[in-house]
Image: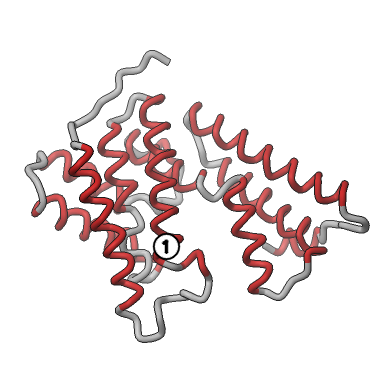
C-alpha cells in the first residue's frame, strides 16, 4: 500500500513486561473467584484461553495497523489490554474496567507520553463499540476488526466443536455447528471495513465453508439443521 507506519517506540522488553502483567492479572482474576472463575467450566472463559485470544488479537491488529498506516504501538498495546478485565467484570463493563487497568499500568510502569496513554486507554474503552467502525479512529478500527476476526475461521470452528462435547452433542451435529460458525463469521465480517481486514475475513470464512463441505461430503447423512442455525 505504501502507507506510513507510525510507532511510538514501545521496546520489546517493555511489551514483554505488559504481556506478563496481563497474563498474571487474568490468572489472578480466576483464582480470586470462590467458584473457580466466572464460567470457567467453559475452556474459552479460562485465563489460558483468554490470554491466547488476546495474543491473537495483538497479532491480527498489528498486521492490519501496519498495512493501513495506523499507529502500530497504540494498536498492539490496546489489543494486549482489551480483555484484561474480562474474567472479573461483567460483559457490559469489562471494556471500561480494562481501560482503567491499562491506564494504571502505563502511568506507573514507564515514561509514556500522555497522548499515547490516552489513545491506548480510549481504544480499550471503545473496543466493544457496536456502531460502524469507521466512526472511530483508525487505531480503534484496527483493534475492533482484529477482535472480530479472531472469532472467524479455523479457531472459531475448533472452539465450536469443543463446545459440542460440553453440550453432549454427537458428531452428526457437526455440520450444523460449523454452519453456525460460518453464519456468525459472516456477520462479524460485515463490520470489517479495512481492505486488510476484509482480506483476512475472506480467507478465514473460506476455510470454514470448505470444512463444512468436507463434512457433508465424507459423512453419510450429515445434514445441516437450518432451524437451529437461524435460531443462533
Residue 17 x/y as whole percent: 21, 50
- The answer to whether residue 35 is above or below residue 77 is below
Q: Measuring 68% from the left and 50% from the top, which residue is drawn there?
A: 183
Q: Please tell me in which quadrant of the rendered image residue 12 appears.
A: top left
Q: Please tell me in which quadrant of the rendered image residue 142 appears.
A: top left
- The answer to whether 224 appears left or right of 43 in the picture is right
Which residue occupies the foreground of this view, 193 or 43? Answer: 43
Q: Measuring 78% from the left and 69% from the top, which residue is drawn there?
A: 170
- The answer to whether 159 appears left or right of 65 in the picture is right
Q: How many marks?
A: 1
Q: Secondary structure at mark 1?
A: helix
Q: Measuring 39% from the left and 65% from the top, which residue is drawn there?
A: 47
- The answer to whether residue 31 is above or below residue 106 is below
Q: Residue furthest bottom?
A: 34
Label 1: which residue? 48
Residue 11 x/y as whole percent: 19, 36
- The answer to whether 231 appears left or right of 119 in the picture is right
Q: Please tell me in which quadrant of the rendered image residue 5 appears.
A: top left
Rate crowding at label 1 as few (under 14), some (14 to 19) or many (20 or more) other CA atoms within 10 Å: few
- The answer to whether residue 183 is above or below residue 67 is below
Which residue occupies the foreground of this view, 76 or 140? Answer: 76
Q: Residue furthest top?
A: 2
**The N terminus, quarter of image:** top left
Residue 15 x/y as whole percent: 23, 44
**The C terminus, quarter of image:** bottom right
Amino acid at each position: 500500500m505504501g502507507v506510513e507506519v507510525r510507532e511510538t517506540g514501545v521496546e520489546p522488553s517493555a511489551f514483554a513486561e505488559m504481556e506478563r502483567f496481563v497474563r498474571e492479572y487474568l490468572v489472578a482474576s480466576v483464582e480470586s473467584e470462590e467458584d473457580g472463575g466466572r464460567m470457567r467450566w467453559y475452556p474459552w472463559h479460562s485465563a489460558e484461553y483468554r490470554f491466547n485470544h488476546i495474543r491473537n488479537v495483538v497479532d491480527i491488529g498489528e498486521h492490519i495497523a501496519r498495512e493501513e498506516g495506523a499507529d502500530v504501538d497504540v494498536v498492539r498495546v490496546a489489543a494486549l489490554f482489551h480483555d484484561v478485565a474480562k474474567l472479573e467484570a461483567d460483559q457490559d463493563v469489562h471494556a471500561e474496567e480494562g481501560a482503567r487497568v491499562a491506564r494504571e499500568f502505563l502511568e506507573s510502569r514507564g515514561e509514556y507520553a500522555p497522548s499515547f496513554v490516552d489513545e491506548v486507554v480510549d481504544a480499550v474503552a471503545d473496543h466493544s463499540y457496536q456502531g460502524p467502525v469507521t466512526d472511530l479512529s483508525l487505531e480503534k478500527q484496527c483493534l475492533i476488526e482484529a477482535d472480530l476476526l479472531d472469532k472467524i475461521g479455523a479457531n472459531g470452528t475448533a472452539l465450536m466443536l469443543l463446545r459440542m462435547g460440553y453440550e453432549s452433542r454427537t458428531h452428526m451435529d457437526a455440520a450444523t455447528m460449523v454452519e453456525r460458525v460460518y453464519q456468525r463469521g459472516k456477520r462479524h465480517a460485515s463490520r470489517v471495513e479495512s481492505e486488510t481486514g476484509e482480506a483476512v475475513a475472506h480467507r478465514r470464512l473460506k476455510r470454514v465453508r470448505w470444512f463444512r463441505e468436507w463434512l457433508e461430503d465424507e459423512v453419510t447423512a450429515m445434514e445441516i439443521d437450518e432451524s437451529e442455525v437461524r435460531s443462533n
